Image: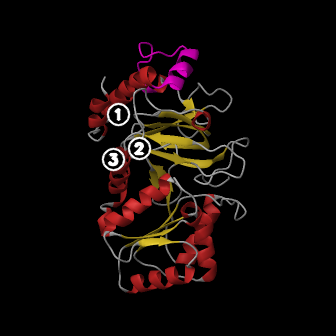
Amino acid sequence: MKLTELQNRLFSISSEQDFENLALDIFAFQYEKVEIYHTFCQALNKTPDKVKSIEKIPFLPIQFFKSHQILAKNTTYQEIFTSSGTTGKQTSKHYIADLEIYEKTFVKAFQQFYGNIEDYIVLALLPSYLERKNSSLIYMVNNFIKKSKHPESGFFLHNYDELSEKLKSLNQQKKKVLLIGVSFALLDLIEKEKFALQNTIIMETGGMKGRRKEITREELHQKLSKGFGVKNIHSEYGMTELLSQAYSQGNGIFSCPKTMKIFIRETEDPLQLLPLQKTGGLNIIDLANITSCAFIATQDLGKKIDTHHFKILGRFDHSDIRGCNLLAL
């Protein structure tokens, strides 16, 4: 199947059957075109003629994004997104063949859960990401800021006083605001100032990045909810190796966009999938990853609530702590 045909089907998914059919076709495409994934599948004796359901598709361990260029044959890349990492640690690299696919994916995912980005003033408190290059999160949020077309939208580094004044002023004007920030920076902000915001969505992207002691998401949300004066804290779940994002609108329960699906694997037997409400490793199907790998076994722990909803419960003990990642249990 041709790449252009797969890309054209990506944004017309309207049913579970559409998702499964496209996932199986992308599996067949990547089996043929992505060298390391082909080798991995062959080692497991999982070939397209033997895999007839998405539950049987092999999930490539996420560590391969650190050691290999995962890109379909005869494909050139426009951008390389890299993960954050401590000094000396090898970082993940995601080779992006088509930035337009990424942009369309994150715009449609946001729209699915929040409506048009143009309706929001977007304020971004992402100092750790702004201080490095090639962050997929910065690329997405910068795109949101441009699309919002509000002169008040923008990034903030360490200018907390200016951000506090802006939040209070916009609140008085009853403007619709999205404040998206890394966890430690949001905590820094509410330690300097207390708020009572009525029309602002507070969205954390996870991660203390070594700036603070790791705490549970529940504890983080309690602190942020009190500090900002809001009922619910929202969350964005994404990573360097993905082009799709899941969102939580409260209570730490994430919803998948139309291009994404979660499975939970047994921690002792990675080829065994678990039923609902059981804790294990997160396997992610991200159909937007057509030219890299759409089937990834992550180092996050979680459980599925139902077909489209899941919770993050931490990370495997032996895995690297990465900036885009979520809080420890």
Name the colouring of the figure: secondary structure
Q: Where is 44 relative to 287, above or below?
A: above
Q: Where is 231 relative to 168, above or below?
A: above
Q: Where is 160 relative to 36, above or below?
A: below
Q: Are marks 2 and 3 in contact (CB under 8 Å)?
A: no
Depth check, mark 3 against mark 1: the one in front is 3
Query: Which residue is found at the position 30% from the left and 61% from the top?
Result: 116
The numbered dot on residue 19 is: 1
Query: Which residue is found at the position 40% from the left and 82% from the top?
Result: 170
- Magenta-span inclusion, residue 35: yes
Q: Nearer the viewer, residue 271 or 36?
A: 36
Query: Which residue is found at the position 31% from the left and 38% from the top?
Result: 10
Query: Which residue is found at the position 50% from the left and 50% from the top?
Result: 238
Q: Which residues are magenta?
A: 34-54
Q: Are marks 1 and 2 in contact (CB under 8 Å)?
A: no
Q: Is residue 135 left or right of residue 91?
A: left
Locate residue 215, reporting x and y percent: 68, 60
Q: Secondary structure at mark 2?
A: loop
Q: CA distance from mark 1 to mark 2?
A: 26 Å
Q: CA distance from mark 2 to mark 3?
A: 10 Å
Q: Secondary structure at mark 1?
A: helix
* Amino acid type, callout 3: Glu
* Amino acid type, callout 2: Gln
- Whichever of callouts 2 and 3 sits on the residue coming sooner in the sequence is 2
* Amino acid type, callout 1: Phe
The residue to which callout 3 is attached is 100
The residue to which callout 2 is attached is 78
Q: Residues within 10 Å of mark 3 (few under 14, many from 20)?
A: few
